[in-house]
Every structure is written in C-alpha cells, then in structure tokens.
C-alpha cells in the first residue's frame, strides 16, 4: 500500500566538533520557521572530534499542510536508513559513513560533501599506511547517491575567512533541493548576527560552485615537470650535480629529495654517504623501470633520518612549525599563542643522544642512572613558545653535532648496512624479492616504544627471510610485512609465520 500522505523534508548533517554543524542545523530550522514550516532539530554527539562525528537531524513540515491535516505533525528524532532527502557531510570520510549507515540512497538522497580529508584515529594510528583511498571513497559515494555535490569546502571556507558550515549552507542553497530562495537563505545568516560578512562571502562562493556542473571538482591539470634545484652552496651543488650525472632519470626525484632531507637532518657529508650507498644499489640488476633503485632510495633516506631526541627537538622548534600552529589556531593580531609540548624521554633515549662513551657509561652505571631515572620517570610539559622552553629544546637539538658518534647511530648504521647487503645479495638472484626486502624498512619507524615495536617486528621478519632462503617468494615476504604492519602486538605476524612454516 502506497503512503500518499505528505512527508516532512528530512535532512541529516554529519560534522566533526568545531565545524559548526550545530550552527548549520539551527540555520535550517530558523529558515524553515521564518518561511512557513514547522521545524525540529536533534543531535547525537560523537565520542570525540574525529573518532565519531555528531549527527544533526532536521525535519521540516509545511504549516499550511499541518493545518490542512487538522493537527500538529509528529517529527522524528533521528534519521532512518533509506528515509533521508538531503545529507550534508563536512568531510569525505563522513560522507562515506553516511553511505555505510544507509542514509544515502540512489532513489532519493542528494548528498552534499566536502572532498577534503581529516584522517581518523584509526588511519593515523595504523603502523603502516592506514589511509582510506580517497578516489575509491569518492567513487563508491557518488554511486550511492541520487545526486552528489562535492568540492573542497575547507579550502573554500579558508579563502573566504569563514567556517565550513557557511559553505555547506551555500551549497545546500545552490543545490535547489529545498523550497527556499537564495534571499531567504541569506536572510537567515543575517538574522544570526555573528560573522555575517564572511559567512555571506563563503555562502555566495559555495552557491555558485554548487550550481556550476553540480559542484563537481574541476579536472586536475597535469603537474608541471619538477624544476631541478639550483643550490648556491658548493657542497650542496656538487651533490645535486652528482645525482643528475650518475643516476637514471626515473630515480632522480627521489634521490634529490633524499639528499635534501639528509642535509636538513645532518649535513652535506651525510647526504654524500647516502649517495655512496645508492651508487652501489644502482649497479645491481633490476627492472627497466628502476623500481629497486627508487624503493631503496626512498626507504634508505627515511632510515638514515631516523627520529632521535635531537631530531624531535629540532622539529618542534622550527619557525615553520610555529607558523603552521598559528595558522591552524587562527591566531588574530594582538592574540598571544602558547604552545605546550609534552615530553617524556626515557633513560634509553637520553643515553642514545649523548656521545657513545658517555651514553654507555650512564646506561651501565648505578647511582647516576637512578638519579636520571628519578627525574625522567614522569613526563614534563615544556612551553616552546616561551624563551626558556624554546632554548631548552634548541640545546637538545644542537646535540646532532655528535649524532654520528652516539650509541643510537652505531646501532642504526649496523642495521642499515645489513639491510643493504641483503638487498644486494638478493638482487643477484631475484630482483623482485629484493624490492620487497627494500620495502621492509617500513617496519622501522617512530620514536621510543613505537620504534622498539617496529624493530622487534623487523628483526622477526628478517629472521624468517634468512630461514627461508631462496625458496621465499616475493608475495610471501610482502604478506609477512603487511601482517607486521597490521597490529602493534605482532599477533598477525606470528599467525602468518606459522601459516608459511617460518615460525
């Protein structure tokens, strides 16, 4: 039996904390009530700003229809799968979640979403690359909706000096899915009385964008060919010229980035060591696309720039970081910004930062060790925006001058040399397996406990590699590596080792 009774307009809004989802819902309610509609909004909050977005739900019902019905409409408190007319999502993953919940249907729903990404906790905390593929997410989401209006609304909000809720409101108006005019939408913003001018600017830009080609992203232009750097420092210029002269073109972009990274990490001589190692790799057998050379270049640069205490301190005190934090916090002229860093270096990290002899003495001592452990057993909050805190971390960052004489460097250097030797030996008989071996560096990452877990998994995989010998297939090594990256406790790695009789 078909339901012929008038139905409310049903709108679901999925937004993270601080993005103005509540303001957007209130705007829709205010607009409805000012233009002859009964309106209701409810919200179901998420547990945190990114582990779960707040879902705001709005229903609108014409007052004239309610009078004709002879009563007051009873509006729902939450959206039901398959029963939503409009879904607004402040971020691409939230659009995907709406599809997953069944709120978006091909027969009925207009989906309006921003295409930018704010990575979820699960994506950020993954030991490997835990990011969801944005292109696949876009494709599945577009296939699920009757109409899909999308563009980078975070960038549009930034360009107009407003917030993403105003952009979503403009896109909603531009979609034409609601029975209200642009003037009625804009009057709603003006009645709010807060941030009216930037909100109207963001609204107008989004309104036009939503009407042009349905709000689709414009075609991306092909990236221009990268310009070769032209350094002025003689030592740096010599390194660049060496890359351009001695290495094949397909690998030069990664090698130049590796050189840049290692000069920043240590000095030109250290970057020269990187190229010496890569020259040996370039002489190994490999495919015509130089995949082994490219993968080794990428992962060797990452390994040689391992995170130690000096590196962490240097990154936290960079001018570019202060500028980025000020931009993200939207600090206005005349406002004071305070940046507090939580630092908890263990005794091991302290010893690894000191020159080798001093570090080993402290690690093996009794009373001095206990004294240091007493002062480091609890973390400290250091305000890097203050002169005292900044100078304290700059002093730690200056320890990089003796980095190559530390315990940590000796250990990392030993592992790197063993890894390169395995790659060289393997490339002679199985270049594809050598590529998979080069990518095993992905297991070694991070700082403190994260680094320890990574090294433990790396050593486990390398023991299995040595145990299997020539019978190990590239796909098997890839499977072991992916299992090691799948969970921090190593359970999946142990299961994979047992499956292949390599435990």
Image (cartoon, rainbow, N blue to C red):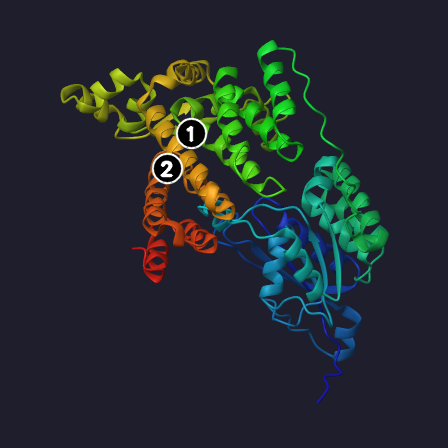
Q: Quadrant of residue 363?
A: top left
User: In front here: 494 or 248?
Assistant: 248
Q: Residues within 10 Å of mark 1 (few under 14, many from 20)?
A: some
x and y percentages locating residue 254 in the rendered image: 60, 32
Residue beneath the point at 73% across and 74% down: 7
Q: Quadrant of residue 81?
A: bottom right
Residue 385 in sight in this render: no
- Secondary element under disc 1, as helix, strand or loop, is loop
x and y percentages locating residue 123 in the rendered image: 51, 49
Identify the residue at the far left of this view.
366
Residue beneath the point at 14% across and 22% down: 366
Give the quarter of the figure containing the C terminus.
bottom left
User: In front here: 317 or 482?
Assistant: 482
Q: Quadrant of residue 454?
A: top left
Q: Earlier in the sequence, mark 2 or mark 1?
A: 1
Distance from the alpha carbon under mark 2 to that under mark 1: 9 Å
* Residue wearing tag 2: 451
- Secondary element under disc 2, as helix, strand or loop, is helix
Residue 245 in sight in this render: yes
Residue 431 shown left or right of residue 181 in the figure: left
User: In front here: 337 or 438?
Assistant: 438
Residue 66's place in the image compared with 442, above or below, is below
User: In front here: 390 or 434?
Assistant: 434
Give the quarter of the figure containing the N terminus.
bottom right
Mark 2–mark 1 contact, CB under 8 Å?
yes
x and y percentages locating residue 66 in the rendered image: 75, 74
* Residue wearing tag 1: 307
Q: Residues within 10 Å of mark 2 (few under 14, many from 20)?
A: some
Residue beneath the point at 77% across and 69% down: 62
Which numbered circle lies on residue 225?
none
């Amino acid at each position: 039996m078909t339901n012929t009774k008038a139905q409310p307009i049903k709108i679901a809004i999925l937004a993270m904390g601080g993005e103005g989802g509540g303001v957007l819902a209130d705007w829709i309610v205010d607009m409805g009530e000012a233009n002859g509609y009964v309106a209701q909004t409810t919200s179901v909050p998420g547990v945190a700003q990114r582990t779960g977005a707040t879902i705001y739900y709005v229903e609108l019902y014409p007052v004239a229809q309610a009078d004709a019905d002879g009563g007051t409409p009873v509006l729902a408190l939450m959206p039901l799968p398959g029963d939503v007319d409009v879904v607004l999502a402040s971020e691409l993953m939230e659009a995907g979640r709406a599809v997953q919940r069944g709120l978006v249907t091909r027969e009925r729903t207009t989906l309006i979403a921003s295409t930018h990404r704010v990575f979820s906790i699960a994506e950020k905390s993954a030991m490997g690359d835990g990011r969801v593929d944005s292109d696949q997410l876009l494709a599945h989401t577009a296939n699920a909706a009757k109409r899909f209006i999308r563009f980078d609304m975070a960038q549009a909000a930034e360009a107009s000096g407003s917030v993403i809720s105003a952009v979503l409101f403009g896109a909603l108006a531009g979609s034409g899915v609601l029975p209200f005019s642009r003037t009625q939408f804009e009057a709603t913003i003006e009645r709010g009385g807060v941030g009216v001018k930037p909100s109207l600017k963001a609204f107008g830009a989004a309104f036009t964008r939503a009407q042009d080609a349905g709000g689709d992203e414009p075609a991306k232009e092909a990236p221009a060919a990268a310009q070769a750097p032209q350094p002025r420092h003689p030592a740096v210029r010599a390194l660049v010229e060496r890359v351009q002269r001695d290495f094949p073109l397909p690998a030069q972009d990664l090698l130049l980035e590796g050189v840049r990274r290692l000069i920043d990490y240590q000095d030109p001589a250290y970057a020269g060591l990187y190229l010496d190692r890569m020259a040996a790799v370039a002489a190994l057998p490999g495919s015509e696309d130089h995949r082994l050379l490219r993968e080794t270049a990428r992962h060797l640069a990452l390994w040689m720039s391992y995170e130690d205490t000096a590196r962490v301190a240097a990154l936290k005190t960079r001018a570019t970081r202060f500028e980025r934090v000020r931009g993200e916090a939207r600090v206005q002229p005349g406002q004071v910004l305070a940046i507090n860093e939580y630092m908890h270096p263990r005794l091991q990290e302290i010893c690894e930062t000191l020159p080798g002899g001093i570090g080993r003495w402290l690690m093996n001592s009794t009373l001095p060790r206990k004294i240091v452990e007493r002062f480091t057993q609890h973390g400290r909050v250091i305000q890097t925006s203050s002169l005292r805190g900044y100078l304290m971390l700059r002093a730690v960052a200056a320890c990089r001058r003796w980095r190559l004489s530390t315990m940590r460097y000796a250990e990392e250097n030993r592992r790197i040399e063993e890894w390169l030797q395995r790659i060289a030996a393997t490339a002679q008989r199985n270049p594809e397996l050598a590529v998979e071996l080069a990518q095993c560096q992905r297991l070694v990452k991070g700082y403190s406990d994260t680094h320890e877990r990574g090294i433990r998994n790396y050593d486990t995989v390398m023991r299995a590699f040595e145990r299997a010998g020539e019978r190990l297939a590239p796909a098997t090594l890839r499977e072991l590596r992916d299992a090691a990256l799948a969970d921090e406790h190593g359970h999946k790695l142990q299961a994979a080792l047992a499956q292949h009789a390599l435990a």
